[in-house]
């Protein structure tokens, strides 16, 4: 367990804008920062970071939080992992209360177990490479022969799994790790009640998250037997999802931002060799087809991708799908083709650093030129195939969301094939029209499904509604109506607008406490002739406490109780106290409120036009008073609604308890008078 004092130090030291900048490209926007969401694909930035409040909010996905929750949401870390990562970044020493026992390790979450095991495995394989005789003779010598320097080998945490049955597995079990999680991680396999190391005899490439945590491994065999797969990768798990991971991104992210360019290669060794040659803004899809998740990862840092291919024609043609996906995300894509028989790894080994960099820059082709060159070689002089080639390229251009870019590419395509730009524009419009018709058809289907669901819900709701007779007092019912009520077992429901009104007023009280709690206001209280200065927290608490009211929403009540606790302890909590709380619901609620305040700041455009609008803060005394009386009014209306429900239930009974009915009616009349009084205070009629 991490001591509370250490957690407080981490929160006080860590800067949310600095941490998020490690994982994505952010831009200054007034006193805040903005970026494109890491959770959804979007054209306009909706991700806001507030250094003053130390919070972030993604308005597209609705997610928000503090520096720790960003790591948990964006990097899928556990709470302890996020704290430890921050402690490492800011050089804060963590002295845990005690070492975890094997039993505590076993009871930890699946993800945390897998993460801890992966870190152990990385160290184990790395130790083998540099300290074990077999590891040095086979694994280290292989990397050296490939031309990798020792500093690069250590930087990428390369390792070796001994070519023995179960040395790694036995070492892990001896440390207290469960066999169940070793198997789940893919590091251990079982057969006939025996367990063995899955990667035995292979050099190991740890696959890091953006934060540098090891998520999985790639293992390359050093044997020449063609029946043995050259590469094995870790299986999918709660920790490792290959479609959302790019090999080398942890080492490349800063360079990608610096040069506003990401180079994309195929294999592990391509990344390492280019990195060693000084080309650090390079990542790999690890031999898998490029995915939406991987493209979005790159987009966090740059909108420019250059794909580096070897001379394999089949592989190049298969890559067209990936290029189209990149274009559809509004990104700019170029392609570099290495000479026949060469790949980025082999080319980097026989050329100087400057030659590698120059080759990439000088041979980068726009995707249209590249695609045309490849397909023209296939089509030759065949006019039909050439027409199909042009249509194929126009289809790719149609995927680009920016219409100006589309026109630029059309012009380039027309020049390249010596064709009429108008003709290509017409073909583009036709392709886009077909695409829209297809999407419209899909939308119609989805809308029809949604409509069916809504109609079904409406039918179910209507079936549960009480009959009108249920609201008529028994003495005014006909015999037929009375019998109908006896047969009907359904109870009337509270009208939703009553609950919604109360929720909104409770929310407004909490909003004012969080945003303006420590602000001083001048209020005239009972028994005082002149206005007195008091802070918003103490005033709201005293007003609610004197009427012995409470909040229906548990989250609101918890926040209110926390403010009250602070007043008792003579501490007026700042807004960041709640955005740092362990309670996820409270933390998210407070962040949403604070972030919404940032979003609603007066637009610079209005300021330029010299439009003067009085802010809520300038009218704070009135806003607080109105919020309190609106809350009390909603609370009274809710109580009246409950009484009406009880009266309706009593009227339905065969024998009425008139004393109880009269008591409830008297209580309702009293509340109605209170409601009228509040109406006068608010200066409006309340229904």
Image (spheres, grey):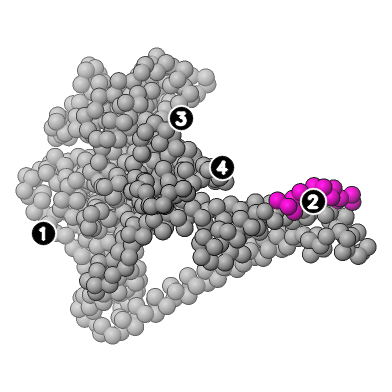
Indicate the position of residue 269 as horizontal and vertical percent values: 22, 40
How far apart are the alpha carbons under marks 2 and 1? 90 Å
Residue 222: image quadrant is top left
Q: Nearer the viewer, mark 4 or mark 3?
A: 4
The residue at which mark 4 appears reads as 548
Residue sitting at 72 percent across and 59 percent down? 460
Q: Quadrant of the N terminus?
A: top left
Indicate the position of residue 425 as horizontal and vertical percent values: 31, 81
The secondary element bearing badge 2 is classed as helix
Residue sitting at 58 percent across and 64 percent down? 686
Indicate the position of residue 47 as horizontal and vertical percent values: 33, 54
Task: State the residue in front, 254 or 554.
Answer: 554
Residue 452: image quadrant is bottom right
User: Tag 1: Cα neighbours inside 10 Å, few (<14), some, or many (≥20)?
Assistant: few
Position of 496 relative to 162 (above/below):
below
The secondary element bearing badge 3 is classed as loop
The secondary element bearing badge 1 is classed as helix
Give the magenta part as a residue range. 653-667
């Amino acid at each position: 367990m991490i001591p509370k004092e250490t957690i407080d130090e981490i929160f006080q030291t860590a800067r949310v804008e600095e941490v998020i900048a490690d994982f994505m490209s952010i831009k200054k926007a007034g006193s805040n920062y903005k970026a494109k969401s890491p959770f959804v694909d979007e054209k306009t930035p909706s991700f806001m970071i507030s250094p003053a409040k130390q919070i972030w909010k993604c308005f597209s996905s609705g997610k928000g939080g503090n520096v720790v929750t960003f790591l948990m949401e964006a990097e899928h870390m556990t709470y302890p992992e996020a704290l430890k990562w921050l402690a490492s970044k800011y050089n804060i020493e963590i002295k845990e209360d005690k070492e975890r026992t094997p039993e505590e390790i076993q009871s930890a979450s699946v993800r945390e177990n897998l993460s801890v095991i992966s870190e152990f495995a990385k160290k184990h394989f790395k130790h083998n490479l540099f300290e074990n005789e077999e590891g040095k003779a086979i694994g280290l010598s292989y990397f050296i022969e490939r031309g990798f320097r020792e500093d690069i080998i250590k930087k990428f945490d390369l390792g070796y799994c001994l070519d023995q049955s179960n040395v790694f597995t036995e070492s892990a079990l001896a440390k207290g790790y469960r066999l169940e999680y070793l198997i789940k991680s893919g590091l251990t396999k079982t057969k006939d009640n025996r367990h063995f190391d899955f990667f035995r005899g292979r050099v190991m490439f740890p696959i890091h998250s953006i934060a540098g945590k090891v998520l999985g491994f790639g293992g390359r065999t050093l044997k020449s037997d063609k029946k043995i797969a050259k590469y094995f990768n870790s299986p999918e798990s709660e920790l490792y999802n290959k479609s959302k991971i790019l090999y080398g991104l942890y080492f490349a992210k800063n360079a990608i931002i610096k040069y506003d360019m990401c180079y994309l290669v195929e294999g592990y060794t391509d990344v390492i060799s280019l990195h060693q040659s000084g080309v650090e803004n390079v990542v790999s899809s690890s031999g898998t087809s490029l995915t939406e998740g991987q493209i979005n990862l790159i987009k966090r840092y740059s909108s420019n991708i250059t794909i580096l291919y070897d001379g394999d024609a089949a592989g190049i043609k298969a890559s067209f799908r990936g290029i189209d996906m990149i274009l559809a995300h509004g990104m700019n894509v170029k392609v570099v083709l290495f000479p026949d028989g060469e790949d980025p790894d082999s080319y980097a080994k026989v050329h100087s650093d400057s030659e590698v960099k120059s080759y990439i820059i000088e041979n980068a082709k726009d995707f249209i030129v590249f695609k045309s060159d490849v397909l023209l070689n296939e089509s030759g002089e065949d006019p039909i195939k050439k027409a199909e080639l042009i249509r194929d390229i126009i289809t790719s251009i149609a995927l680009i969301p920016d219409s100006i870019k589309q026109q630029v590419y059309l012009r380039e395509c027309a020049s390249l094939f010596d064709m009429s730009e108008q003709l290509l524009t017409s073909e583009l419009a036709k392709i886009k029209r077909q695409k829209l018709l297809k999407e419209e058809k899909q939308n119609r289907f989805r809308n029809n499904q949604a409509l069916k669901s809504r109609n079904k819900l409406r039918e179910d709701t209507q079936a549960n509604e009480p009959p009108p007779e249920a609201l008529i007092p028994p003495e005014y019912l006909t015999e037929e109506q009375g019998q109908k009520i006896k047969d009907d077992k359904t109870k009337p429901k509270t009208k939703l607008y009553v609950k919604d009104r109360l929720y909104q007023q409770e929310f407004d009280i909490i909003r004012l406490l969080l945003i303006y709690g420590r602000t001083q206001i001048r209020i005239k209280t009972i028994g005082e002739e002149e206005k007195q200065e008091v802070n918003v927290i103490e005033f709201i608490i005293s007003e609610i406490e004197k009427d012995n009211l409470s909040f229906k929403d548990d989250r609101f009540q918890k926040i209110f109780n926390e403010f009250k606790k602070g007043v008792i302890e003579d501490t007026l909590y700042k807004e960041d106290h709640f955005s740092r709380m362990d309670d996820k619901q409270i933390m998210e609620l407070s962040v949403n409120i604070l972030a919404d305040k940032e979003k609603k700041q007066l637009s610079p455009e209005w300021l330029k036009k010299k439009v003067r609008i009085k802010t809520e803060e300038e009218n704070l005394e009135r806003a607080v008073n109105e919020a309190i009386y609106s809350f009390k009014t909603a609370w009274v209306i809710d109580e009246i609604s409950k009484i009406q429900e009880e009266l309706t239930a009593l009227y339905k009974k065969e024998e009425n308890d008139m004393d109880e009915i009269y008591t409830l009616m008297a209580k309702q009349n009293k509340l109605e008078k209170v409601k009228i009084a509040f109406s006068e205070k608010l200066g409006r009629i309340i229904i």
